Image (cartoon, grey):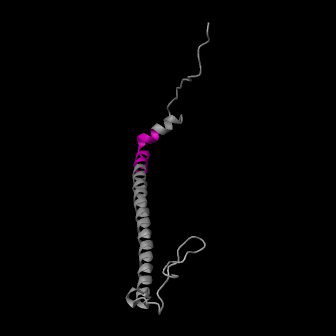
Amino acid sequence: MVGGRSAERPSGGRVIALPAGRPRAIPRSSRLRLNLPRVALLVAAVYLAVLVGSKVSLLVSLRLDLHRTRQRTQQVESLNAALRDQIADASTDAYVEQAARQLGLTRPGEILFSTSPDRRPPAD
């Protein structure tokens, strides 16, 4: 302040005068203090959170794989049961005879009569 008035800056802004003397110190309680044990605890907490998060993700992935594997095992077991039934049916005499007849085979002493669906009587 000059002569009881506030001084004008050339840019039009006002200049506020500070009281003369020693600047006031910021109280210790409001200063940001880095405490080594607190920082170490924070770093350890973040590390553990990341570690646990990755393990949980791995656990979820493994459980999903286990579920898929169990489903596939059930499918294979049902297919295996169906194939065992088919093998049991194929070993019966009736099945063997039916398969032989489809191939055009006969028993000794039998005569095979067959008709051809391709032969047609001549058209008049």
Task: Name the residue: 39% across, 48% down.
Answer: 85
Q: Residue furthest front?
A: 3
Task: Name the residue: 41% across, 45% down.
Answer: 89
Task: Name the residue: 46% across, 87% down.
Answer: 19
Q: Main secondary structure of the magenta part?
A: helix
Q: Which residues, given as a range, are shown in magenta?
A: 83-97
Residue 77 visible at all: yes
Q: Nearer the viewer, residue 49 or 111?
A: 49
Counting from the top left corner in percent of width and height, residue 90 is at 44, 45
Counting from the top left corner in percent of width and height, residue 73 is at 41, 58
Q: Nearer the viewer, residue 102 or 16?
A: 16
Q: Nearer the viewer, residue 55 or 28?
A: 28
Counting from the top left corner in percent of width and height, residue 97 is at 45, 39
Left or right: where does residue 64 sit relative to residue 13? left
Q: Residue furthest top?
A: 124
Residue 107 visible at all: no
Give residue 69's quadrant in the image.
Answer: bottom left
Q: Residue furthest bottom?
A: 22
Q: Residue furthest left?
A: 29
Counting from the top left corner in percent of width and height, residue 113 is at 52, 26
In the image, residue 24 above or below residue 101: below
In the image, residue 18 above or below residue 103: below
